[in-house]
Amino acid sequence: MTDGLRHIHDSATLLEMSVTGLKSANAVSYDDVYDVGFLGTASLYNIGYVMAKAIVENDARKPRGIPQTAPYKFVLRYTQLPAYGMDKDHPTLGPNTIDAANQLANGCN
């Protein structure tokens, strides 16, 4: 996990690649995906951890827990944080990731 946090921007990039891959007309082979470092779900756990940590720290003074929520709501909540994109602890997400979350929030319209 510590090593993954050192390379958190790689995790954000791999998340972006996975989102753009969903729109692709042609599937990318497993070997090609493996070669760029998408080794299972660890990369997504790393970026998810950083996002959840930032939300918890931002909401620490508010008397509410973190309910389980749809992934797109989680992404959008993270991007609304005041510190989003301001430092290494709040990395920006790719535009396709944010667009996909907004699309889901709007009922896939």
Image (cartoon, grey):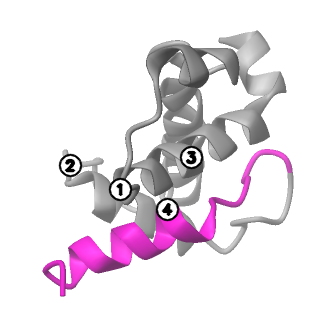
Question: As rendered, which of 15 and 87 lies closer to the eye?
Answer: 15
Q: Who comes first in sequence, dot 1 or dot 4? A: 1
In the image, farthest residue toward the front: 26
Q: Amino acid at mark 4?
A: Thr
Residue at (13% x, 80% y) in the render:
107
Of circles 4 and 2, the one toward us is 4
Callout 4: SS: helix
| Quarter of the view holding residue 50 | top right
Label for residue 17? 3
Separation of residues labelled 2 and 1 (CA atoms): 35 Å
Relative side of 5 to 73, left or right: right
Is 87 covered by the magenta stretch?
no
Disc 1 is placed on an element classified as loop
Q: Which residues are magenta?
A: 88-109
Residue under numbered circle 1: 25
Q: How many marks?
A: 4
Dots 2 and 3: beta carbons under 8 Å?
no
**Up/down of 84 relative to 25, above or below:** below
**Marking on residue 2:** none
Residues 82 and 2: in front is 2
